[in-house]
Image (tube, rainbow, N blue to C red):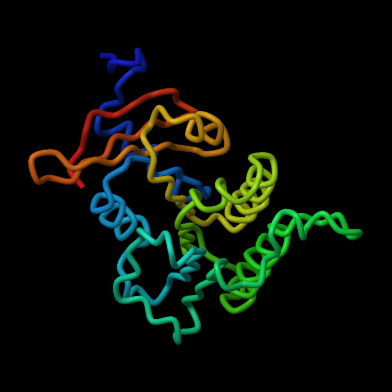
Amino acid sequence: MEDERGDAVPDCATFARTLGTLKREGSNILLVGTAKGPHETACQQLLGAAREDARYRLFVTDADDHVAHEGGADPGIERVRTIDYSQSGLESRSESDGESGQPSLGTLGIEIVETIGEFDDSADGLAPSALRVCVDSLVPLLQEYDAETVFRLLQLTTSRVDQACGMGHYHLPLGPDHDAVNLLEPMFDAVVTVRSRNGTDEQQWYLREADTTTDWLEL
């Protein structure tokens, strides 16, 4: 069986096994689609139960473009950290072209890597899928910085999430055919398109390694 783009559609058992592998080995997921509500629902599911003590959660956000769901996440808890890059003192692109030559997003990347390292130290080694990272969203970064700079930031972040066998998801609230989605898609293990249809939030997964796309599933 194939979907409209010609990809094989996995059966439920195959899909469940693939998700299990992503949890064990680490994964990075790109969330696309223009509807805000389904983004929040998918985010909540990917973060896991908010009161699950075994998990560490890192939110990387721009307060002006916030779509993710932090329900139950107390920033005062040691296992939950928020990096608000709208207030992190990042320079503009023109200011980042100084003598140091370091892109301003390099500062954000270092902060993300160091925070994950602190989680790893606190846990005496993070268990598979214990780390959950939410980047919300990529749109302001793509508006402010050139694509190559954002690409490097994502390479750094996704590699560190993989190294920790964590689960990262990255909100890109644009249509699945947008140029930005096509540009960034190869960096991720899966691309999940979300939508709201007849009052129901739905998701469709594209699993890159298997080159398969699921049917639309209720969130």
Residue 46 percent coordinates (x, y): 36, 55
Residue 43 percent coordinates (x, y): 34, 56
Instruction: Left or right? Give the position of 174 relative to 103.
Output: left
**Taking 88 as reference, is 40 above or below it?**
above
Q: Quadrant of residue 111?
A: bottom right
Q: Nearer the viewer, residue 34 or 1?
A: 34
**At x 34% / y 17%, what residue is drawn?**
8
Instruction: Left or right? Give the position of 79 relative to 118.
Output: left
Q: Quadrant of residue 194?
A: top left
**At x 52% / y 57%, what residue is drawn?**
166
Instruction: Left or right? Give the position of 74 relative to 168.
Output: left
Q: Nearer the viewer, residue 131 or 147?
A: 147
- Residue 19 visible in the snapshot: yes
**At x 22% / y 33%, what residue is drawn?**
216
**At x 56% / y 46%, what residue is drawn?**
142
| Residue at the bottom extreme of this rendering | 76
| Residue at the front extreme of this rendering | 94
Instruction: Left or right? Give the position of 63 relative to 8.
Output: right
| Residue at the right extreme of this rendering | 99
